[in-house]
Amino acid sequence: MKYSDTGAHYDAIIVGSGTCGATIARELSRKGRKVLLLERGENAPLKESLLGYAKVSNEVHVTDKLKDLRAFTTGGTTAMYLAVADLPPIEAFRKLGIDLTHAFEQVREELPITEIADEFIGAQAKKLGESARQLGYDWKKKLMLVDQSKFNSKNYYEVKWKARTFVEEALANGVTLVNRAVVSKVIHESKKAIGVEYTIGKKKDIQKAYGDKIILAAGSLVTPLILRDSGIRNVMNNGFYINPSIGLLGAVSGLSSAENFCGCMGAKMDDDIELMDANFHRFLFNVGMLVSAKPLRIASYPKHIGITVKVKEPVGGELTERGRFHKKLTDADFQKLNKGVAAANEILKNAGAKRIFKTSLISGGALGTIKIRQHVDEKLETEYHNLYVCDGSVLPDTDRVTPTLTLVCLARHLSAAL
Ligand SMILES: Cc1cc2nc3c(=O)[nH]c(=O)nc-3n(C[C@H](O)[C@H](O)[C@H](O)COP(=O)(O)OP(=O)(O)OC[C@H]3O[C@@H](n4cnc5c(N)ncnc54)[C@H](O)[C@@H]3O)c2cc1C
Protein backbone atom coordinates (compact mmCIF):
# COMPACT_ATOMS: atom_id res chain seq x y z
CA MET A 1 0.00 0.00 0.00
CA LYS A 2 1.39 3.43 -0.96
CA TYR A 3 0.94 6.34 1.41
CA SER A 4 1.05 9.93 0.34
CA ASP A 5 1.16 12.77 2.79
CA THR A 6 0.01 16.09 1.38
CA GLY A 7 1.84 17.85 4.21
CA ALA A 8 -0.98 20.38 4.38
CA HIS A 9 -2.36 21.19 7.81
CA TYR A 10 -5.89 22.49 8.37
CA ASP A 11 -7.75 24.15 11.22
CA ALA A 12 -10.53 21.63 10.58
CA ILE A 13 -11.13 18.57 8.42
CA ILE A 14 -14.79 17.74 7.75
CA VAL A 15 -15.71 14.27 6.51
CA GLY A 16 -18.86 14.41 4.35
CA SER A 17 -20.47 17.47 2.75
CA GLY A 18 -24.14 16.62 3.48
CA THR A 19 -26.57 18.53 5.68
CA CYS A 20 -24.19 18.74 8.64
CA GLY A 21 -20.83 18.81 6.87
CA ALA A 22 -21.97 21.60 4.53
CA THR A 23 -23.33 23.67 7.42
CA ILE A 24 -20.13 23.32 9.46
CA ALA A 25 -17.93 24.08 6.44
CA ARG A 26 -19.90 27.25 5.77
CA GLU A 27 -19.84 28.38 9.40
CA LEU A 28 -16.10 27.76 9.89
CA SER A 29 -15.29 29.43 6.57
CA ARG A 30 -17.16 32.53 7.75
CA LYS A 31 -14.79 32.61 10.73
CA GLY A 32 -11.83 32.53 8.32
CA ARG A 33 -10.73 28.99 9.24
CA LYS A 34 -8.66 26.86 6.92
CA VAL A 35 -10.98 23.94 6.18
CA LEU A 36 -10.64 20.72 4.18
CA LEU A 37 -13.97 19.15 3.15
CA LEU A 38 -13.67 15.51 2.05
CA GLU A 39 -16.64 14.18 0.09
CA ARG A 40 -17.09 10.66 -1.19
CA GLY A 41 -19.46 11.61 -4.01
CA GLU A 42 -18.93 13.68 -7.11
CA ASN A 43 -19.76 17.30 -7.80
CA ALA A 44 -21.85 17.06 -10.99
CA PRO A 45 -24.79 19.50 -11.19
CA LEU A 46 -27.84 18.16 -9.34
CA LYS A 47 -30.64 17.09 -11.66
CA GLU A 48 -33.98 15.59 -10.92
CA SER A 49 -33.91 12.93 -13.61
CA LEU A 50 -33.59 9.14 -13.63
CA LEU A 51 -29.94 9.41 -14.60
CA GLY A 52 -29.31 12.24 -12.12
CA TYR A 53 -30.75 10.16 -9.25
CA ALA A 54 -29.02 6.97 -10.37
CA LYS A 55 -25.65 8.75 -10.26
CA VAL A 56 -25.96 9.88 -6.65
CA SER A 57 -28.20 7.34 -4.92
CA ASN A 58 -26.81 4.56 -2.77
CA GLU A 59 -28.62 1.92 -0.71
CA VAL A 60 -27.54 -0.09 2.29
CA HIS A 61 -29.32 -3.01 3.98
CA VAL A 62 -30.74 -2.28 7.44
CA THR A 63 -32.94 -5.40 7.79
CA ASP A 64 -32.87 -8.66 5.83
CA LYS A 65 -35.14 -7.20 3.16
CA LEU A 66 -35.08 -3.46 3.67
CA LYS A 67 -32.53 -0.98 2.36
CA ASP A 68 -31.93 2.60 3.51
CA LEU A 69 -31.51 5.20 0.78
CA ARG A 70 -28.91 8.00 0.86
CA ALA A 71 -27.10 10.23 -1.63
CA PHE A 72 -23.35 10.38 -2.22
CA THR A 73 -22.70 13.77 -3.79
CA THR A 74 -21.69 17.28 -2.75
CA GLY A 75 -24.51 18.33 -0.43
CA GLY A 76 -25.37 14.73 0.56
CA THR A 77 -28.89 13.34 0.91
CA THR A 78 -30.65 16.71 0.50
CA ALA A 79 -30.02 16.07 -3.21
CA MET A 80 -32.97 13.64 -3.03
CA TYR A 81 -35.04 14.62 -0.03
CA LEU A 82 -38.64 15.88 0.11
CA ALA A 83 -37.81 18.99 2.19
CA VAL A 84 -40.36 18.39 4.97
CA ALA A 85 -39.05 20.40 7.93
CA ASP A 86 -40.34 19.35 11.34
CA LEU A 87 -39.22 21.69 14.11
CA PRO A 88 -36.15 20.57 16.08
CA PRO A 89 -36.89 18.68 19.32
CA ILE A 90 -35.34 21.40 21.49
CA GLU A 91 -36.44 19.74 24.77
CA ALA A 92 -35.00 16.34 23.86
CA PHE A 93 -31.63 17.99 23.16
CA ARG A 94 -31.82 20.12 26.30
CA LYS A 95 -32.19 16.93 28.35
CA LEU A 96 -28.94 15.77 26.74
CA GLY A 97 -27.18 18.99 27.72
CA ILE A 98 -27.42 20.69 24.32
CA ASP A 99 -29.31 23.96 23.91
CA LEU A 100 -30.31 24.45 20.27
CA THR A 101 -32.44 27.56 20.90
CA HIS A 102 -29.96 30.12 19.61
CA ALA A 103 -28.91 28.01 16.62
CA PHE A 104 -32.56 27.51 15.69
CA GLU A 105 -33.24 31.26 15.85
CA GLN A 106 -30.33 31.88 13.48
CA VAL A 107 -31.38 29.11 11.09
CA ARG A 108 -34.98 30.35 11.06
CA GLU A 109 -33.73 33.76 9.95
CA GLU A 110 -31.75 32.32 7.05
CA LEU A 111 -33.63 29.35 5.62
CA PRO A 112 -36.99 29.36 3.84
CA ILE A 113 -39.02 27.43 6.44
CA THR A 114 -42.65 27.67 5.45
CA GLU A 115 -46.02 26.03 4.95
CA ILE A 116 -46.93 25.63 1.30
CA ALA A 117 -49.43 28.30 0.20
CA ASP A 118 -52.91 27.00 -0.76
CA GLU A 119 -52.41 28.16 -4.35
CA PHE A 120 -49.40 25.82 -4.75
CA ILE A 121 -51.13 22.75 -3.33
CA GLY A 122 -52.43 20.50 -6.11
CA ALA A 123 -55.94 19.05 -6.36
CA GLN A 124 -54.65 15.60 -5.32
CA ALA A 125 -53.30 16.82 -1.97
CA LYS A 126 -56.42 18.93 -1.42
CA LYS A 127 -58.72 15.98 -2.14
CA LEU A 128 -56.77 13.78 0.26
CA GLY A 129 -56.80 16.43 2.99
CA GLU A 130 -60.58 16.96 2.65
CA SER A 131 -61.20 13.24 2.94
CA ALA A 132 -58.96 12.88 6.01
CA ARG A 133 -60.58 15.83 7.77
CA GLN A 134 -64.10 14.53 6.95
CA LEU A 135 -63.14 11.35 8.79
CA GLY A 136 -61.93 13.31 11.82
CA TYR A 137 -58.16 13.22 11.27
CA ASP A 138 -56.26 16.32 12.35
CA TRP A 139 -54.80 16.70 8.85
CA LYS A 140 -52.57 19.78 8.90
CA LYS A 141 -49.96 21.54 6.78
CA LYS A 142 -46.35 20.76 7.62
CA LEU A 143 -43.39 23.10 7.41
CA MET A 144 -41.10 22.69 4.44
CA LEU A 145 -37.69 24.00 3.36
CA VAL A 146 -38.99 25.53 0.15
CA ASP A 147 -38.43 28.98 -1.35
CA GLN A 148 -41.92 29.69 -2.67
CA SER A 149 -40.90 33.15 -3.90
CA LYS A 150 -38.96 31.40 -6.69
CA PHE A 151 -41.64 28.81 -7.50
CA ASN A 152 -42.92 28.87 -11.08
CA SER A 153 -45.27 25.82 -10.98
CA LYS A 154 -42.60 23.61 -12.56
CA ASN A 155 -39.39 23.91 -10.54
CA TYR A 156 -40.44 21.71 -7.58
CA TYR A 157 -36.91 20.35 -7.25
CA GLU A 158 -35.01 23.60 -7.64
CA VAL A 159 -36.94 25.54 -4.97
CA LYS A 160 -36.17 23.02 -2.22
CA TRP A 161 -33.30 24.16 0.00
CA LYS A 162 -30.27 21.90 -0.45
CA ALA A 163 -27.04 21.64 1.53
CA ARG A 164 -25.11 22.13 -1.69
CA THR A 165 -25.82 25.89 -1.48
CA PHE A 166 -23.93 25.98 1.84
CA VAL A 167 -20.98 24.15 0.25
CA GLU A 168 -20.92 26.68 -2.56
CA GLU A 169 -20.77 29.50 -0.03
CA ALA A 170 -18.00 27.73 1.89
CA LEU A 171 -16.01 27.29 -1.33
CA ALA A 172 -16.39 30.98 -2.13
CA ASN A 173 -14.94 31.66 1.35
CA GLY A 174 -11.87 29.54 0.62
CA VAL A 175 -12.74 26.01 1.83
CA THR A 176 -10.94 23.20 -0.04
CA LEU A 177 -13.34 20.51 -1.31
CA VAL A 178 -11.98 17.15 -2.46
CA ASN A 179 -14.56 14.97 -4.23
CA ARG A 180 -14.38 11.16 -4.58
CA ALA A 181 -12.46 11.16 -1.27
CA VAL A 182 -13.44 8.09 0.77
CA VAL A 183 -12.32 8.53 4.36
CA SER A 184 -11.62 5.24 6.13
CA LYS A 185 -9.91 6.16 9.39
CA VAL A 186 -9.04 8.87 11.84
CA ILE A 187 -5.33 9.22 12.62
CA HIS A 188 -4.79 9.61 16.36
CA GLU A 189 -1.98 9.87 18.87
CA SER A 190 -2.39 9.38 22.62
CA LYS A 191 -6.20 9.58 22.35
CA LYS A 192 -6.03 12.80 20.32
CA ALA A 193 -7.27 12.99 16.70
CA ILE A 194 -4.75 14.62 14.40
CA GLY A 195 -5.84 13.70 10.86
CA VAL A 196 -7.60 11.28 8.52
CA GLU A 197 -6.72 8.64 5.98
CA TYR A 198 -8.60 8.52 2.69
CA THR A 199 -8.44 7.20 -0.84
CA ILE A 200 -9.54 8.92 -4.05
CA GLY A 201 -12.05 7.05 -6.22
CA LYS A 202 -10.80 3.58 -7.08
CA LYS A 203 -7.14 4.40 -6.48
CA LYS A 204 -5.57 2.32 -3.72
CA ASP A 205 -2.98 4.87 -2.55
CA ILE A 206 -3.81 6.12 0.92
CA GLN A 207 -3.74 9.88 1.37
CA LYS A 208 -3.27 11.51 4.74
CA ALA A 209 -4.36 14.97 5.80
CA TYR A 210 -3.85 16.62 9.17
CA GLY A 211 -5.95 19.08 11.13
CA ASP A 212 -6.58 20.52 14.61
CA LYS A 213 -10.21 19.41 14.66
CA ILE A 214 -11.73 16.47 12.84
CA ILE A 215 -15.49 16.38 12.32
CA LEU A 216 -17.20 13.21 11.11
CA ALA A 217 -20.36 14.09 9.16
CA ALA A 218 -20.48 11.10 6.79
CA GLY A 219 -24.04 10.06 7.69
CA SER A 220 -25.56 7.71 10.26
CA LEU A 221 -24.55 4.49 8.49
CA VAL A 222 -20.94 5.53 7.76
CA THR A 223 -19.67 7.51 10.76
CA PRO A 224 -19.92 4.52 13.18
CA LEU A 225 -17.84 2.45 10.74
CA ILE A 226 -15.12 5.13 10.59
CA LEU A 227 -15.10 5.32 14.40
CA ARG A 228 -14.91 1.54 14.73
CA ASP A 229 -12.04 1.35 12.23
CA SER A 230 -10.27 4.14 14.12
CA GLY A 231 -10.31 2.10 17.36
CA ILE A 232 -13.51 3.42 18.99
CA ARG A 233 -15.29 0.10 19.22
CA ASN A 234 -17.99 0.93 21.75
CA VAL A 235 -20.16 2.24 18.88
CA MET A 236 -20.99 -1.35 17.89
CA ASN A 237 -24.23 -3.06 18.89
CA ASN A 238 -26.09 -0.11 20.38
CA GLY A 239 -29.05 -0.18 18.05
CA PHE A 240 -30.68 2.39 15.79
CA TYR A 241 -34.13 3.17 14.42
CA ILE A 242 -35.54 3.27 10.89
CA ASN A 243 -39.20 4.40 11.23
CA PRO A 244 -40.55 1.69 8.87
CA SER A 245 -43.00 3.06 6.33
CA ILE A 246 -45.42 1.94 3.61
CA GLY A 247 -47.07 3.93 0.82
CA LEU A 248 -50.68 3.47 -0.33
CA LEU A 249 -51.85 4.87 -3.65
CA GLY A 250 -55.12 4.76 -5.54
CA ALA A 251 -56.81 6.41 -8.52
CA VAL A 252 -59.79 8.77 -8.25
CA SER A 253 -61.71 9.02 -11.51
CA GLY A 254 -62.36 12.54 -12.73
CA LEU A 255 -59.50 14.00 -10.68
CA SER A 256 -57.19 16.18 -12.70
CA SER A 257 -54.45 17.98 -10.94
CA ALA A 258 -51.46 20.25 -11.04
CA GLU A 259 -48.44 18.79 -9.28
CA ASN A 260 -47.63 18.80 -5.57
CA PHE A 261 -45.00 19.29 -2.90
CA CYS A 262 -45.07 15.75 -1.52
CA GLY A 263 -45.24 15.59 2.28
CA CYS A 264 -46.74 19.07 2.67
CA MET A 265 -49.54 17.80 4.95
CA GLY A 266 -50.26 14.96 7.33
CA ALA A 267 -51.67 13.78 10.66
CA LYS A 268 -50.51 11.92 13.73
CA MET A 269 -52.42 8.95 15.12
CA ASP A 270 -52.07 7.11 18.46
CA ASP A 271 -49.41 4.44 18.89
CA ASP A 272 -46.65 6.51 17.25
CA ILE A 273 -48.24 6.20 13.82
CA GLU A 274 -47.96 9.09 11.36
CA LEU A 275 -49.82 9.55 8.08
CA MET A 276 -48.20 11.78 5.48
CA ASP A 277 -49.35 13.16 2.18
CA ALA A 278 -47.68 11.10 -0.57
CA ASN A 279 -48.84 13.15 -3.54
CA PHE A 280 -45.60 13.35 -5.43
CA HIS A 281 -44.86 15.70 -8.25
CA ARG A 282 -44.75 13.95 -11.56
CA PHE A 283 -41.10 12.90 -11.71
CA LEU A 284 -41.08 11.25 -8.26
CA PHE A 285 -44.43 9.58 -8.97
CA ASN A 286 -43.00 8.06 -12.15
CA VAL A 287 -39.96 6.77 -10.24
CA GLY A 288 -42.25 5.34 -7.55
CA MET A 289 -44.39 3.51 -10.13
CA LEU A 290 -41.31 2.02 -11.80
CA VAL A 291 -39.92 0.87 -8.43
CA SER A 292 -43.34 -0.60 -7.52
CA ALA A 293 -43.55 -2.40 -10.91
CA LYS A 294 -46.67 -0.40 -11.86
CA PRO A 295 -45.47 1.38 -15.03
CA LEU A 296 -48.99 1.48 -16.55
CA ARG A 297 -50.07 3.84 -13.76
CA ILE A 298 -47.69 6.53 -15.00
CA ALA A 299 -50.16 7.67 -17.68
CA SER A 300 -52.85 8.32 -15.07
CA TYR A 301 -50.67 10.40 -12.73
CA PRO A 302 -53.26 13.22 -12.28
CA LYS A 303 -55.85 10.77 -10.89
CA HIS A 304 -53.59 9.27 -8.24
CA ILE A 305 -53.63 10.20 -4.59
CA GLY A 306 -51.40 8.66 -1.94
CA ILE A 307 -50.50 8.41 1.75
CA THR A 308 -47.32 7.27 3.48
CA VAL A 309 -47.77 5.42 6.77
CA LYS A 310 -44.76 5.82 9.05
CA VAL A 311 -44.41 4.18 12.47
CA LYS A 312 -41.87 4.39 15.26
CA GLU A 313 -40.23 1.12 16.19
CA PRO A 314 -38.04 0.64 19.28
CA VAL A 315 -34.29 1.17 18.99
CA GLY A 316 -32.60 -2.15 18.26
CA GLY A 317 -30.30 -4.03 15.96
CA GLU A 318 -26.55 -3.95 15.68
CA LEU A 319 -23.48 -3.06 13.70
CA THR A 320 -21.86 -6.44 13.18
CA GLU A 321 -18.15 -7.27 13.15
CA ARG A 322 -18.40 -7.46 9.35
CA GLY A 323 -19.58 -3.85 9.23
CA ARG A 324 -23.23 -4.64 8.51
CA PHE A 325 -26.13 -2.77 10.12
CA HIS A 326 -28.96 -5.12 10.87
CA LYS A 327 -32.19 -5.10 12.84
CA LYS A 328 -35.33 -7.23 12.97
CA LEU A 329 -38.78 -5.73 12.89
CA THR A 330 -41.21 -7.33 15.34
CA ASP A 331 -44.86 -8.37 15.21
CA ALA A 332 -45.67 -5.25 17.24
CA ASP A 333 -44.06 -3.06 14.56
CA PHE A 334 -46.12 -4.76 11.84
CA GLN A 335 -49.30 -4.39 13.92
CA LYS A 336 -48.71 -0.63 14.05
CA LEU A 337 -48.08 -0.54 10.32
CA ASN A 338 -51.29 -2.49 9.70
CA LYS A 339 -53.27 -0.08 11.86
CA GLY A 340 -51.84 2.86 9.88
CA VAL A 341 -52.50 1.11 6.58
CA ALA A 342 -56.16 0.51 7.56
CA ALA A 343 -56.54 4.24 8.34
CA ALA A 344 -54.85 5.25 5.07
CA ASN A 345 -57.10 2.86 3.15
CA GLU A 346 -60.18 4.38 4.77
CA ILE A 347 -59.06 7.92 3.82
CA LEU A 348 -58.29 6.94 0.23
CA LYS A 349 -61.62 5.11 -0.20
CA ASN A 350 -63.52 8.02 1.32
CA ALA A 351 -61.87 10.24 -1.30
CA GLY A 352 -63.24 7.91 -4.00
CA ALA A 353 -59.97 6.10 -4.75
CA LYS A 354 -60.12 2.75 -6.54
CA ARG A 355 -57.40 0.25 -7.51
CA ILE A 356 -55.58 0.99 -4.23
CA PHE A 357 -52.22 -0.72 -3.82
CA LYS A 358 -49.49 -0.84 -1.17
CA THR A 359 -45.82 -0.23 -1.88
CA SER A 360 -43.30 -2.53 -0.30
CA LEU A 361 -41.87 -1.61 3.10
CA ILE A 362 -39.59 1.46 3.05
CA SER A 363 -36.99 2.63 5.55
CA GLY A 364 -38.04 6.03 6.90
CA GLY A 365 -34.33 6.82 7.47
CA ALA A 366 -31.83 4.87 9.60
CA LEU A 367 -30.75 7.21 12.41
CA GLY A 368 -29.49 7.27 15.99
CA THR A 369 -26.57 4.85 15.59
CA ILE A 370 -24.46 6.85 18.07
CA LYS A 371 -25.64 8.03 21.48
CA ILE A 372 -24.98 11.43 23.02
CA ARG A 373 -23.60 10.98 26.58
CA GLN A 374 -22.54 7.42 25.74
CA HIS A 375 -20.29 7.66 22.68
CA VAL A 376 -19.96 11.44 22.38
CA ASP A 377 -20.33 14.10 25.08
CA GLU A 378 -22.51 17.23 25.09
CA LYS A 379 -19.91 18.92 22.87
CA LEU A 380 -20.33 16.01 20.39
CA GLU A 381 -16.69 15.10 21.09
CA THR A 382 -15.70 11.43 21.11
CA GLU A 383 -13.29 9.72 23.50
CA TYR A 384 -10.54 11.00 21.18
CA HIS A 385 -9.84 14.64 21.93
CA ASN A 386 -10.64 16.95 18.94
CA LEU A 387 -12.72 14.29 17.16
CA TYR A 388 -16.39 15.27 16.80
CA VAL A 389 -19.48 13.59 15.33
CA CYS A 390 -22.26 15.65 13.76
CA ASP A 391 -24.77 13.93 11.47
CA GLY A 392 -27.90 11.77 11.61
CA SER A 393 -26.07 9.23 13.75
CA VAL A 394 -26.42 11.36 16.92
CA LEU A 395 -30.16 12.10 16.60
CA PRO A 396 -31.94 10.95 19.76
CA ASP A 397 -34.73 8.39 19.37
CA THR A 398 -37.09 10.35 21.60
CA ASP A 399 -39.13 13.00 19.76
CA ARG A 400 -38.30 11.68 16.29
CA VAL A 401 -38.76 14.31 13.59
CA THR A 402 -37.82 14.71 9.94
CA PRO A 403 -34.10 15.26 10.51
CA THR A 404 -32.80 17.97 8.18
CA LEU A 405 -33.79 21.14 10.02
CA THR A 406 -32.62 19.68 13.34
CA LEU A 407 -29.30 18.67 11.79
CA VAL A 408 -28.70 22.16 10.36
CA CYS A 409 -29.30 23.57 13.87
CA LEU A 410 -27.07 20.98 15.53
CA ALA A 411 -24.27 21.63 13.03
CA ARG A 412 -24.58 25.33 13.58
CA HIS A 413 -24.50 24.83 17.35
CA LEU A 414 -21.34 22.74 17.09
CA SER A 415 -19.67 25.21 14.70
CA ALA A 416 -20.06 28.01 17.23
CA ALA A 417 -17.91 26.01 19.68
CA LEU A 418 -15.19 24.95 17.22
C1 LIG B 1 -35.90 9.94 -0.39
C2 LIG B 1 -35.58 10.69 0.87
C3 LIG B 1 -36.45 11.68 1.32
C4 LIG B 1 -36.15 12.40 2.47
N1 LIG B 1 -37.00 13.40 2.85
C5 LIG B 1 -36.70 14.12 3.93
C6 LIG B 1 -37.54 15.20 4.31
O1 LIG B 1 -38.56 15.49 3.68
N2 LIG B 1 -37.19 15.96 5.40
C7 LIG B 1 -36.06 15.68 6.11
O2 LIG B 1 -35.79 16.39 7.09
N3 LIG B 1 -35.26 14.65 5.78
C8 LIG B 1 -35.53 13.88 4.71
N4 LIG B 1 -34.70 12.87 4.35
C9 LIG B 1 -33.54 12.56 5.20
C10 LIG B 1 -32.43 13.60 5.13
O3 LIG B 1 -32.15 13.96 3.81
C11 LIG B 1 -31.16 13.02 5.79
O4 LIG B 1 -31.51 12.46 7.03
C12 LIG B 1 -30.11 14.09 6.04
O5 LIG B 1 -29.72 14.68 4.82
C13 LIG B 1 -28.90 13.44 6.70
O6 LIG B 1 -27.87 14.40 6.81
P1 LIG B 1 -26.41 13.93 7.24
O7 LIG B 1 -25.57 15.16 7.33
O8 LIG B 1 -26.51 13.03 8.41
O9 LIG B 1 -25.93 12.99 6.05
P2 LIG B 1 -25.92 13.18 4.47
O10 LIG B 1 -26.71 14.35 4.03
O11 LIG B 1 -26.27 11.85 3.90
O12 LIG B 1 -24.39 13.50 4.18
C14 LIG B 1 -23.35 12.57 4.36
C15 LIG B 1 -22.27 12.90 3.32
O13 LIG B 1 -21.10 12.13 3.62
C16 LIG B 1 -20.57 11.61 2.42
N5 LIG B 1 -19.80 10.41 2.78
C17 LIG B 1 -20.27 9.17 3.08
N6 LIG B 1 -19.26 8.35 3.38
C18 LIG B 1 -18.12 9.07 3.28
C19 LIG B 1 -16.74 8.77 3.47
N7 LIG B 1 -16.34 7.55 3.87
N8 LIG B 1 -15.82 9.74 3.23
C20 LIG B 1 -16.21 10.98 2.81
N9 LIG B 1 -17.51 11.32 2.64
C21 LIG B 1 -18.45 10.39 2.88
C22 LIG B 1 -21.80 11.31 1.56
O14 LIG B 1 -21.47 11.24 0.21
C23 LIG B 1 -22.69 12.50 1.91
O15 LIG B 1 -22.45 13.60 1.04
C24 LIG B 1 -34.96 12.13 3.21
C25 LIG B 1 -34.09 11.14 2.77
C26 LIG B 1 -34.38 10.43 1.61
C27 LIG B 1 -33.43 9.37 1.15
Image (cartoon, helix red, strand yellow):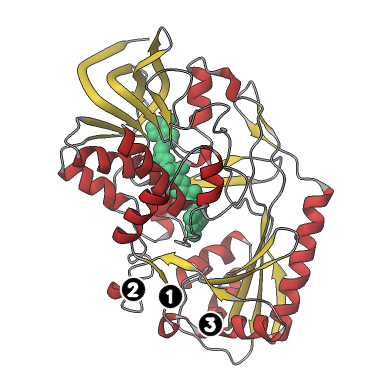
Q: What's under tag 3, amino acid-wise?
A: Pro
Q: Are marks 3 and 1 in contact (CB under 8 Å)?
A: no
Kind of residue sitting beneath label 2: Gln
Residue type at the position of mark 1:
Ile
Residue at left offset 57%, top offset 48%: 365
Quarter of the rendering containing residue 249: bottom right
Of mark 2 and mark 3, the one earlier in the sequence is 2
Pointer 1 residue: 116
- Say if 223 sits above or below 140 in the image: above
Measured Cα–Cα span from mark 2 to mark 3: 22 Å
Is residue 378 or residue 354 the one in the foreground? 378
The numbered disc on residue 302 is 3
90 or 181: nearer the eye? 90
Q: How far apart are the two marked residues, 3 and 1, measured between alpha carbons?
A: 19 Å
Numbered mark located on residue 148 in the image: 2
Rendering coords of residue 352 (x, y %): 69, 87
**Does residue 336 sit above or below 264 in this rendering?**
above
Outermost residue toward the bottom in this view: 254
Q: In the depicted view, which residue is nearer to us: 138 or 105?
A: 105
Callout 3: helix, strand or loop?
A: helix
The spot of residue 46 in percent (x, y) is: 33, 55
Disc 3, ligand 1: is the CB inside 8 Å? no
The local crowd at label 1, few if under 14, some if 14 to 19, many if 20 or more residues have their Cα within 10 Å, is many
Question: Along the horizontal axis of the image, is 366 left or right of 171?
Answer: right
Please report contact status of discs 1 and 2: CB closer than 8 Å, yes or no: yes
Residue at the extreme top of the image, as rendered: 190
Q: Residue at left 39%, top 13%?
A: 192
